């Protein structure tokens, strides 16, 4: 693919309530500003601990959102900008999307969704999805403890006795594994519910008890009426009924998350159980999950927060920014022009195989 126009990047302030991260830190802006021009929206990094003056010192120019939308041709953000359709020309967007973004109206520009690099070999720090998921897994345990009203270590005081919290992680992705590791350090009895022998090995490697879920649940949605799936959900709920904390993170990276706990399964859980649904942005592993809401149902709390990575916004932003910087260094020439190498597997993943195939044929 030939070189495109010289890059003028716009660093945007996040607009999702509770989102405190920023996509590029001043340090990484300083590295990238030697290649191309960067404008930043004032206040974009303040919630993560990065002042406007630091961005100016790094070589970026402050501007309001309207000016950035008009003048820039590459936009960098944590979340997909909701106002992207108003950006001038055929803009290129670099962000970490959710599977449900695909159902939104298309924009004229090129969507470089960093979620497409999740788990891709050799992505390293550019796999920001896995890094941010691990942060979410850690934060989920702390949020669960807060919702349960217990301190650290994770113990329930029962008269003169202290009993450890029973915690279950559904799935064996980065978030679930980090949740297991954090909960164990805090004294919880941990269980990992997975599908494969590889999941079993990862669970036992962390010292957690492994429980096998029925594979039919891996692609089950709320509308699924298959008798086997319904029976599998009921069995899963019975296996979870002794758990006080359930952290769920199954299968939303490439599509809508499967529903593991439906309305019929919830009554089988013990009153007081807290569910932290890390797949809320992908529809949720619990049928009653609502994005960025806490639902109380029969004394069961279902937490659908999508901003858990913002608990430590400074460190989360640092890790996110490192991946974005390395990606932009890969996608731009030394003189600051976008160039997509279709022989590069990471580039093909990032721009999407459909787009890469069209470009290669043209």
Image (spheres, helix red, strand yellow):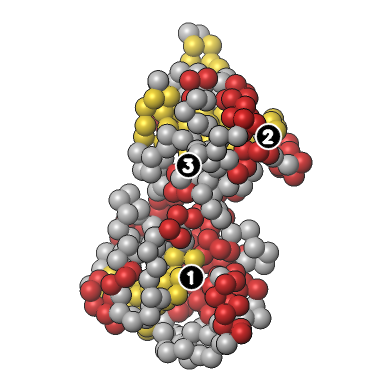
Say whether residue 33 is visible.
yes
Residue depicted at 49% across the width and 55% down the height: 99
Residue 286 in percent (x, y) is at 48, 35
Where residue 298 appears, as percent x and y from the top left, is 40, 20
Name above or below for residue 100 compared with residue 227: below
Picture disc at residue 284: 3
Seen as rendered, the residue at the extreme top is 159
Label 1: which residue? 112
Mark 3–mark 2 distance (CA, rounded to whole Å): 18 Å
Going from the N terminus, do you reach mark 2 or mark 1 first? 1
The spot of residue 246 in percent (x, y) is: 53, 31
Give the Cα separation between the discs numbered 2 and 1.
34 Å
Label 3, label 1: how many angstroms apart (C-alpha)?
Answer: 24 Å
The image's mark for residue 283 is none
Quadrant containing the C terminus is: bottom right
Image-based side of 99 in relation to 184, left or right: left
Label 3–label 1 contact, CB within 8 A:
no
Residue drawn at 41 percent across, 47 percent down = 306
Residue under pointer 2: 214
For the question of whether residue 233 can be seen, the reply is no
Of the numbered discs 3 and 1, the one sitting upstream in the chain is: 1
The residue depicted at 76 percent of the width and 41 percent of the height is 197
């Amino acid at each position: 693919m030939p070189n495109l126009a010289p890059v003028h990047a716009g660093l945007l302030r996040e607009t999702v309530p509770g989102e405190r991260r920023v996509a590029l830190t001043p340090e990484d802006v300083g590295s990238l500003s030697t290649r191309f021009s960067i404008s930043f929206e004032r206040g974009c990094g303040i919630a993560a601990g990065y002042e406007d003056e630091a961005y100016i010192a790094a070589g970026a120019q402050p501007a309001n959102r309207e000016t950035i939308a008009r003048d820039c041709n590459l936009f960098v953000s944590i979340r997909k900008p909701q106002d992207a359709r108003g950006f001038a020309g055929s803009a290129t967007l670099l962000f970490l999307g959710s599977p449900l973004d695909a159902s939104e109206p298309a924009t004229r520009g090129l969507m470089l969704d960093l979620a497409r690099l999740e788990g891709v070999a050799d992505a390293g720090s550019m796999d920001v999805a896995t890094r941010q998921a691990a942060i979410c897994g850690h934060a989920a345990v702390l949020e669960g403890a807060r919702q349960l009203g217990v301190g650290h270590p994770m113990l329930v005081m029962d008269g003169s006795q202290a009993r450890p919290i029973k915690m279950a992680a559904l799935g064996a992705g980065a978030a679930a594994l980090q949740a297991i590791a954090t909960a164990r350090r805090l004294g919880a009895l941990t269980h990992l519910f997975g599908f494969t022998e590889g999941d079993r090995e990862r669970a036992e490697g962390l010292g957690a008890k492994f429980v096998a879920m029925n594979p039919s649940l891996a692609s089950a949605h709320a509308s699924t009426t298959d008798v086997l799936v319904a029976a599998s959900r009921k069995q899963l709920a019975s296996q979870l009924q002794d758990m006080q904390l359930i952290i769920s993170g199954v299968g939303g990276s490439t599509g809508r998350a499967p529903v593991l706990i439906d309305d019929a399964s919830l009554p089988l859980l013990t009153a007081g159980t807290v569910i932290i649904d890390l797949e809320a942005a992908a529809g949720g592993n619990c049928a009653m999950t609502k994005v960025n809401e806490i639902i109380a149902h029969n004394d069961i709390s279902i937490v659908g927060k999508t901003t858990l990575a913002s608990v430590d916004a400074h460190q989360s932003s640092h890790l996110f920014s490192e991946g974005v910087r390395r990606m932009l260094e890969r996608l731009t020439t030394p003189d600051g022009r976008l160039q997509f190498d279709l022989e590069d597997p990471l580039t093909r993943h990032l721009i999407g195989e459909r787009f890469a195939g069209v470009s290669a044929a043209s």
